[in-house]
Image (spheres, rainbow, N blue to C red):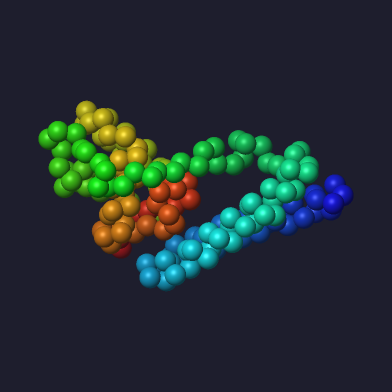
């Protein structure tokens, strides 16, 4: 592929990424059952676009790749499950949930942002609770339908949470 072809294709693919991001937000407005039904296919398409179309272009023409500062800095992934968590002494699940709910809003927020907000609130209260523990609890709250979540909540930058309407 020639450079001018790569530039043109890259431009169109980046437009597609922007359109998919708008579609992701539209999917977020659907009911939970509809969102779950669409999410697996949606993230498969996004992954294919990034890994099978954009990455080969960037391997051939590295200068076309957007600067790291224009992209998400880290792909936070949490493999910790709630049954592996041990809360600090004196903190119950109910108390921890109250802390989480105290910083949540009914608008969609990236899971990474919510983890940060909850972690900051825990620090204010003198609790040393790590982000992985918070993310594991957010997943449980979403799975039990106490909050709404879209995407794989283990992937903090590719998922969002909000209070239920």
Q: In which image quadrant can residue 164 be found?
A: bottom left
157 lies left or right of 49? left
- Specify whether 122 is left or right of 107: left
Residue 79 in the image: above or below residue 9: above
- Closest to the observer: 17 or 45? 45
Residue situated furthest front in the rendering:
84
Visible in this render: residue 109?
no
- Examine the rendered structure and indicate whether residue 52 appears above or below residue 115: below
Which residue corresponds to the image point at 55% horizontal and 41% vertical from the top-left? 72
Residue 16 image point, x, y percent = 66, 59
Query: How many numbered marks appear?
Result: 0
Using the image, determine if residue 88 lies above or below residue 79. Answer: above
Q: Quadrant of the C terminus?
A: bottom left
Quadrant of residue 49 within the rendered picture: bottom right
- Is residue 94 visible to us here? yes
What residue do we see at 53% from left, 65% from top? 41
Residue at image location 50% in from the left, 42% down from the top: 75
Q: Is residue 1 left or right of residue 20?
A: right
Where does residue 161 sit, x and y in percent of width and height? Answer: 37, 53
Which residue lies most toward the left here?
90
Dividing the picture into quarters, in which one does residue 88 lie? top left
Q: Position of residue 66 (x, y in %)?
A: 68, 41
Residue 54 rendering spot, x and y as whole percentages: 69, 51
Q: In the drawing, does residue 107 fall left or right of residue 103?
A: right
Q: Residue at x 40, y 43 (%)?
A: 78
């Amino acid at each position: 592929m020639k450079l001018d072809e790569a530039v043109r294709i890259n431009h169109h693919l980046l437009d597609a990424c922007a359109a998919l991001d708008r579609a992701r937000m539209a999917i977020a407005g659907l009911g939970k059952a509809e969102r779950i039904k669409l999410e697996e296919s949606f993230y498969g398409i996004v992954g294919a676009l990034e890994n099978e179309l954009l990455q080969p272009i960037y391997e051939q023409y590295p200068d076309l790749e957007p600067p790291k500062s224009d992209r998400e800095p880290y792909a936070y992934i949490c493999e910790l499950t709630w049954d592996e968590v041990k809360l600090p002494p004196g903190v119950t699940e109910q108390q921890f949930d109250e802390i989480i709910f105290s910083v949540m809003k009914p608008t969609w927020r990236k899971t990474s942002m919510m983890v940060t907000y909850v972690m900051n609130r825990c620090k204010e209260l003198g609790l040393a609770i790590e982000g992985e523990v918070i993310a594991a609890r957010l997943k449980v709250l979403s799975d039990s339908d106490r909050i709404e979540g879209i995407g794989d909540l283990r992937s903090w930058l590719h998922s969002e949470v909000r209070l239920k309407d």
